[in-house]
Image: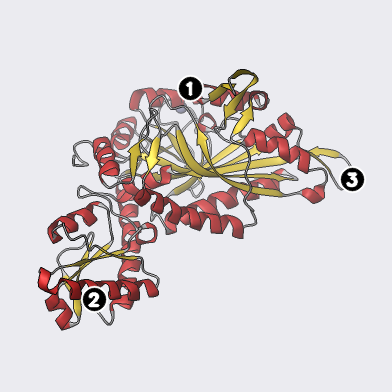
Amino acid sequence: MTPQSEDFSAWFNELVLKAEIVDRGPVRGTMVIRPYGYRIWELLQSDLDRRIKETGHPNAYFPLLIPQSYMQREAEHVEGFAPELAVVTHAGGKVLEEPLIVRPTSETVIGEYMAKWISSYRDLPLLLNQWANVVRWELRPRLLLRTTEFLWQEGHTAHADEADAMRETMLALHEIYARTVRELAAMPVIEGEKTPSERFAGAARTFTIEGMMRDGRALQAGTSHYMGTNFARAFDIQYAAQDGRLTHAHTTSWGLSTRLVGGVIMTHGDDKGLVLPPRVAPYQVVIVPISRSDQGAEVIAAAAALAQRLAGSGIRAHVDDRPHLSPGFKFNDWELRGVPIRLELGPRDLAAGSAVMVRRLGEGKEPISLDGAPARLADELEAFQDFLFERATAFRDSHTVTTDEWDDFTKAVATGWARALHCGTPECEEEIKAATSATARCIPLDGEPESGPCILCGRLSAYGTRVIFGRAY
Ligand SMILES: [Zn+2]
C-alpha cells in the first residue's frame, strides 16, 4: 500500500478496496458497500437511530422520486442543487409530462406533507426522521467521501417559532451528531456554524461538526440547518396560532451520511491499514488458532469456546479458522482490517490456560489468562477506544495554529487548520480559497470572544470569535 506520507489519497483509495470496505460501482461515482464496510455503518447507524428516537423523532419514509415543480419552489434550494440533480424524463416507455427528480435531499417532498399535516399550533412541533439513499451527481467523485449515491438519515422538523426551531437545530448537532461521532467514531469533532457562503442551499443558518483527518484536512461529518420560514413559505406550512392567526412554521433539517465511515478511516488509519475504534469495529477481537494439524481440532474447539464466552460478555469476537492460510498471513490481514485486538492461541498457550494478546497499535505480545479474558479484554477495548480519541485530539491540536499573520496562516493550512479572525465577506473567503485552497470550516460555538483585523484584508472581523480555516474533503 502507498504510505500516507507519500500520497494520502492513494493510501485511502487502496485501503478501502483492499480492506473490503467498498468496491467501485458500475456507474461512475457510485459504490458498492461490502459487508465489512456495511457493518461499520450499521454500528454507527444503530447508535444514531437510538438517539434520534430517544429525542422524540419517529422514522418515516418518503418517495425517492420528487416532481420537478417541488424542487423549483424554493429559489436558493433549486439553484444550489441544480448542477447535481439526476432527472428522470422517460418511464414506462414514454416521455413523462413532468420530469421527476431523484431526491438529492427531501426538504421539498417532506415540506409538501408537513403543509398537509399541520393546521394548528397543537400539531407542533412535528418531528420526523428518514433513513434513505440520495443521489447527487458528482463531477469529481471520491470513494466513500463524495459518491453519486449515498446512504444517510435526514431529520426534518417544523416548529412554532424560531426559538424552538433553533433548540432543535442545536439538539441534533450536539446531542445526536457530536455525541455519536465522539463516543463511537472516536473523532474529536468541533461544533460550529458555517459562514454564509458555506450554508446549505435554502437555510437561514447551517451548523456543522468538523473533524481533522490524518493529512490535516477537514471532514464535515454532519450538518444541522435552521431554515427559518424559507421552506414554510415555499410549501405553505402554516398553523393557526393560539389567537387564531395563520402563522408560518419554522423548519429544520439535519443529515449524517456514509461518508462518516470514510472519516473513521482517515482519522485513525495508518500505513498498515485500518485502525478501528472498538465501538464501530465489526470484530473487536479476532482469535487466530495456531497449531500443527494433529492438534488442530482441539485448538479450534478451544478458540470457538473462548469466542462464545467473549460474545456472552458483549464482545464481538471472531475465530479465523481458515485452514488454507498461514498465521502470518492472518495477522497481516486483521491488521489491515483494523481489528483492535488479536489473540493467538496454540497448544502450549492452551496447556498454560492463556492466550497471547496483540493490540492493533501496541508493541509486543502479552499473555493473558483465558479465565479472566472477558473482563480483561473489555477493559482493553475501553482503553483502546479512549486512546484513539485522545490521540486524534492531540493530533488535531498539534496541527492547529492560532494566528494573525498571513504567512503563518498559509503555512498552517498547508498541513492543518488555522484559527484566524475574518471580516465575514464572501469575496474575502473566495480570495483565501484561491490563494491557499483553504475554506472557512466553521465558527466554533465555544470560541473565545475576540475581534480585530481580518487575516487577509485587514477589515474589522465579524462573528465575534476566530474562524477555523482548512482544506477540506
Ligand atoms: Zn477579509
Q: Which residue is mark 1?
A: 427
Disc nearer the start of the sequence (2/1) = 2
Label for residue 302?
2
Q: Residues within 10 Å of mark 2 (few under 14, many from 20)?
A: some
Q: Secondary structure at mark 2?
A: helix
Please state which amino acid type lies under the numbered disc 3: Asp
Q: Residues within 10 Å of mark 3 (few under 14, many from 20)?
A: few
* 2 and 1 marks in contact (CB < 8 Å): no
* Residue 436, quarter of picture: top left
In the rendered structure, the answer to whether residue 182 lies left or right of residue 175 reads left
Disc nearer the start of the sequence (3/2) = 3
Q: Secondary structure at mark 3?
A: loop
Write the residue at 28% across / 54% down.
275
Q: Residues within 10 Å of mark 1 (few under 14, many from 20)?
A: few
Q: In front: mark 3 or mark 2?
A: 2
In the picture, which quadrant includes the N terminus? top left
Q: CA distance from mark 3 to mark 1?
A: 45 Å
Place of residue 450 in the rendered image (x, y in percent of width and height, measured from the top left): 48, 42
In the rendered structure, the answer to whether residue 191 lies left or right of residue 54 reads left
Q: Which residue is mark 3?
A: 243
Please state which amino acid type lies under the numbered disc 2: Ala
Place of residue 78 in the rendered image (x, y in percent of width and height, measured from the top left): 60, 24
Please state which amino acid type lies under the numbered disc 1: Glu
